[in-house]
Image (tube, coloured by chain):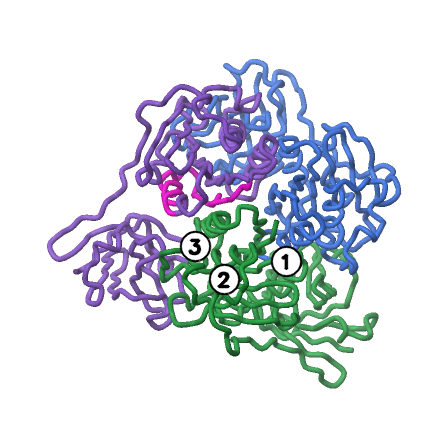
Chain colours: A green, B blue, C purple
Amino acid sequence: MRTISLCTDFGTSDWFVGTMKGVILGINARASIVDITHGIPAGDIRAGAIALKMSYRFFPRRTVHVAVVDPGVGTDRAAIAVRTQNYFFVGPDNGVMSWALASEKVVGTWRLENPKYFLTKISNTFHGRDIFAPVAAHLSIGLPPQKLGPVAGEIVTIPWPGPKLLAGKVQGEIVYIDHFGNAITNIESPLIRNRENCVCEIARPRRIRCRLGSSYAAVPAGQPIAIIGSSGLLEVAVNGYSAARKFGLQVGNIVSVKL
Amino acid sequence: MRTISLCTDFGTSDWFVGTMKGVILGINARASIVDITHGIPAGDIRAGAIALKMSYRFFPRRTVHVAVVDPGVGTDRAAIAVRTQNYFFVGPDNGVMSWALASEKVVGTWRLENPKYFLTKISNTFHGRDIFAPVAAHLSIGLPPQKLGPVAGEIVTIPWPGPKLLAGKVQGEIVYIDHFGNAITNIESPLIRNRENCVCEIARPRRIRCRLGSSYAAVPAGQPIAIIGSSGLLEVAVNGYSAARKFGLQVGNIVSVKL
Amino acid sequence: MRTISLCTDFGTSDWFVGTMKGVILGINARASIVDITHGIPAGDIRAGAIALKMSYRFFPRRTVHVAVVDPGVGTDRAAIAVRTQNYFFVGPDNGVMSWALASEKVVGTWRLENPKYFLTKISNTFHGRDIFAPVAAHLSIGLPPQKLGPVAGEIVTIPWPGPKLLAGKVQGEIVYIDHFGNAITNIESPLIRNRENCVCEIARPRRIRCRLGSSYAAVPAGQPIAIIGSSGLLEVAVNGYSAARKFGLQVGNIVSVKL
């Protein structure tokens, strides 16, 4: 019983994800397939990279993580498999797995070029089904990754947008807005040394000033609060409501924390 | 092979649900994890309670049902596990499991206080991942619930909104609107004794009068019909359309049945 | 370990799909259940038929495919199981499985009339739970389909809308719009003999003229392109955007390819 996780921008309204699972089960009938999400906005490699970064390490060792946010499908962008000390990662070489890999000890990286482990007929538009699903299934039953193709040289990485340490404050940005409308920033909890007096500010699109609390419900319903979220990053929330909708927040908005 | 069901308001656009499943499989690699739904409106404990009430008894005996609609996460609300004659239920003690428990024979109730069965690091915002998923996984491999913490006293229950029996009619209300736009009421089928002549009425927001039928297609397309739904509750539907959208129906609207 | 696929219009916001899975696991605890999709528009039998046609053959042999797009539930429409050389199909007899069956060698077809393999109590509105899920589970553990009921006579089929071969061009239509806004047509790739010079045109609702390319990214972002999609059908896409939204495309719009 080996776990294969899937993280894509395929949505769930079509047959795409189900088809990938059918392909996997045809190769490894005992695979335990888990959806991380298929709700990554179409082509948004950074959102895919965040979803994978936040979730991958909660899976059992030896999980094969498949990440397919792939606007370059059908071009000459490479397809890769990466082995780390604990996991495999499979997907296009466009940076979607780079934020997860930044915390892992990489053991090896291979280009997916051996058609023996692909479906027989390869489309130009759906490598999730034709290449990534069968490769992941083969890895899950113990295929040595060396069989997949040649060692890859340097792979594509996206720089993680680190916060800036300025005089008396940390300046970061919103990196993700979740389903609840909470605005997750790139400010890591160790940067916030004085939690009792810290004030979090967003200047635009609308001014928000709030204190750091320990639960959404620590402020009255409808009030904003800063909180260390489940990934150890500062987030801005509104108790009982969507902070993003209430304040028009978007990825990229600047967030400051006065220390 | 033990089943664990998940019912949450986490949505499926982020990595939250997948992460919970990763945690579960790290403890019980053979768990069969089923999503009841993750589409409960954010923080809507009553909608979560209905989803669980309507579905839990269709699962195999000894299924561990995990219900996480948890606006009080991070506050001092308790986390509990309940054993009934047939199932386990795990979640916050806020009433979300109370409508399911009302039909079950409860054997015992425990507070989740033993960190041995949690993830090592507990966030303030995601007990689904840090507490409820690992506890459910441990129960699914046979952990005696007594190990989880002390016996809980009385747990939070939400009163089920019973219909009123008035002269010549039953007066109930809409308790849920489903994906098809069917308006499910709290009027149970045994209350409708004279099915042939019964007339169902909604006065507001728009007047609807319809008869009881035995299939959506028993009336012409676009026409309203009352029907005993799959949970044994009267529902108001429109053949081929969303009754909720067509008539502006909402949870709480009053529904009368003339007997 | 046998695979059961589910393709429905039930959505995922309610408890319907989870309940079907609970029923299946109660009969076959080792079933591997895969969602093809539950996002078929409510009652849209043709969309369900396409999703099944495009995906079913990627599943392991002996998969039981359950297709429930069933606006006639509760009427006297038949419920059927079909055995083909490679698969089982279970669902209402309304054509939803007919486009998949057109490519399969049918071995036998039975009407689901033996209540022994249903849930004890049958609702008028949710045969997915009460009939199709338990029948599929029984088939997945080896029940001979003959036990389910009498042999069915002719079953309902929907004609696949074939393209027309006119002087110097193929005229087809949009048959499906996917999550990315790509417009999938009924024009099969072998009909396009001269790929280098082929021009694809849509006259309405807005004029589009584009060439055939081999990847979405073969044209600049925002530009339309025709491409042979993953099912071997011509599709019209826009690099990085939704073609459907950009050009107001809908199922049924006429698409011509000059040869």
Q: Kindly indicate whether the residues beneath marks 2 and 3 are on one polypeptide chain.
A: no
Residue type for callout 1 = Ser
In this picture, which residue range is highlighted in magenta? C32-54
Magenta span contains residue B241: no
Residue type for callout 2 = Val
Q: Earlier in the sequence, mark 1 or mark 2?
A: 2
**CB-based contact (under 8 Å), mark 2 and mark 3:** no
Residue at label 3?
C179
Q: Residue at x 59, y 18 (%)?
A: B192
Counting from the top left corner in percent of width and height, residue C149 is at 43, 20
Q: CA distance from mark 3 to mark 1?
A: 25 Å
Comparing marks 1 and 2, which lies closer to the viewer? 2
Tag 3's secondary structure? loop
Residue type for callout 3 = His
Residue at label 1?
A242
Residue at label 2?
A68
- Judge from the rendering whether residue B9 lies leftward or rightward of residue A7; answer left or right: right
Residue A44 vertical placement versus B19 (above, below): below
